[in-house]
Amino acid sequence: MATKWKVIVPSIIAGTVAIGGIAAYLYLKVIPAREGTSPVASAKIVPDEAWMAGYIDVNADSWNKLREFGTPEAQKLIFGSFDSMTAEVKKELTKEKLDYDKDIKPWLGSIMFAMVPVTEKSPEPSVLMVVGIKDKVEALNFANKLKDKKELKVKETEHKGVKILEIGSSAGSGSPGFVAILDNHLALSDKPDIVKKAIDSSKGDPSLADGDAAKILEDTMKLDNPVAQIFVPNYGQLIEHFGALNPTQPFPPQLKAQLNQIKSVSVGMGIDNEGVRFRAITKVNPDSFKWEFKPVPGKIIAQFPANTLMSANGGDISGQWKYALTQLESLPEFKTGLDQVREQVRQATQLDLDKDIIGWMDGEVGLALIPGNEGLLQSVGFGGTLVFKTSDRTKAEATFAKFDDLAKQSNIPVNKSKIGNVEVTQWQFPPTKEILAGHGWLDKETVFVAIGNPIIKTMATKPDKPLDQSEAFKSITKSLPQSNSGYFYVNMDEANKLILNNPAIQSSGFLDPESEAILKSIRGLGMASTQQDKSTYTGDILLALKPKS
């Protein structure tokens, strides 16, 4: 396959000379390319039956934005293979007396790859490649340079008035490829029927850009310097298609029904001054997907200290749990597994998982990993905490009291102490009597659970500088949606202090020089999701990178 495209791609435009002569020249000279490099324009050529499509802006200047970030080691790692591959391509083109920067780069705009079934009964798709032409005059210049190459064998056929070129080696080696020129695009495949379908879509047959898809594609790429995109027009069908490739493990009908609630998924990628940014848009069936989005206040973040390694917050676990049950309990495998978990919890704790444990978690919830190197945390350097806001303190207190009784029955010492103004219940590690875990109420509706004595002390004492006021947190989350269902945040500077200085990790061989170079180039990670309307959910991710050192 690689050899075939190596012959075909540099030679595709040569077919324009055979197709049109003077007419092609005038068309290319007089009519400028209008939208040949946009995802929507390319999607108009992809048949609507495509399983999925990926779009790449091949403009090197767009990707070169990455060269503004990272350590020299990371730069070498990221661009070393790319530069080597580019050098190899340029070397091969030189053999053909071609210069990539002068002959190809000026007209090559974008590439979209799509998985398209050859027939309705065919379980395996073929690849359709749609190449955007950003400058037709430069494309013609390239064609003129190639037209006299004798090593290419070109055969013409026609479909609905459009020429299809079958391009192969004059020596007969390898399989031919097929290409059609469609206004500002080239449609390529190793199957002629796939190219015919692309022609049909370009002439008005259903395409991947029909209906809401065009707006989804556009909205996903509303990023500074967008460079790539993946679009799945029907997520449920895609999973089902892949399942058909392995008929020995068919999908249960109930699972298919749940997956088909997800209509489409689109993910865009951009590179801006902060780093690498992703935006995902998921469309669902509003009649069956009836989760009511409620923005999370985000107040729990203020309970964590500024040097928090990682944090995540959300809301109304009990409500989400009930909704998940309505969606998934119809699946026999899920219900069987859940019933087993419920019974195991009941036997171990005499508590009802749904009512006693999850039932009171109806407010905001937060999770954090916080540095700490005393006592039991000395070997790992951090501990964890969970914070819950609840409207049913009585039930929550009864649940914690039950867990305390179970700890005592297991010969784990349980003691109460006061840290600042907070009364804390602490569990001790039996062999050493060091504090293992603790819990306490920060106010009348906020309870925390923490692992490790340093983390218990940190949570019981209001931080001098809370996480939501730290420069690191604000700089990473400021560009994310403010009305959201919660943040996921990682402070890589703080995390690296532990990862790169942990003797166990260093001696394990798990952290090689390449991984270390990447870690040192990352400033942090931020994620947030929101709901635009009853059928549209969005997610934004920022991989914040350090400036080039």
Image (cartoon, rainbow, N blue to C red):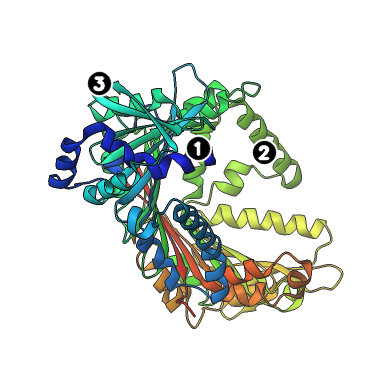
Label 1 near label 3: C-beta < 8 Å? no
Q: Which residue lies furthest to the top in this view?
A: 121
Tag nearer the camera, 3 or 2: 3
Is 247 placed above or below 264 here? above
Q: Which residue is drawn at 66% across and 21% down?
A: 248
SS at mark 2 in the image: helix
Q: Say which residue label 2 marks.
A: 342
In this picture, residue 221 sits left or right of residue 81: left
Say which of 417 and 239 sits in front.
239
Residue 95 on image: x %, y %: 47, 53
Residue 80 on image: x %, y %: 55, 65
Residue 385 on image: x %, y %: 60, 65
Q: Say which residue label 1 marks.
A: 4
The disc at residue 160 is 3
SS at mark 3 in the image: loop
Can residue 208 be seen from the camera position used here?
Answer: yes
Q: How crowded is mark 1: few (under 14 residues within 10 Å), some or many (20 or more)?
A: some
Label 1 near label 2: C-beta < 8 Å? no
Measure how far apart labels 2 and 1 are at the Cα level: 57 Å
Residue 487 on image: x %, y %: 45, 60
Can residue 54 be seen from the camera position used here?
Answer: no
Tag nearer the camera, 2 or 1: 1
Q: Residue at x 31, y 51 (%)?
A: 109
Q: How crowded is mark 3: few (under 14 residues within 10 Å), some or many (20 or more)?
A: few
Q: Which amino acid does label 2 sit on?
A: Arg
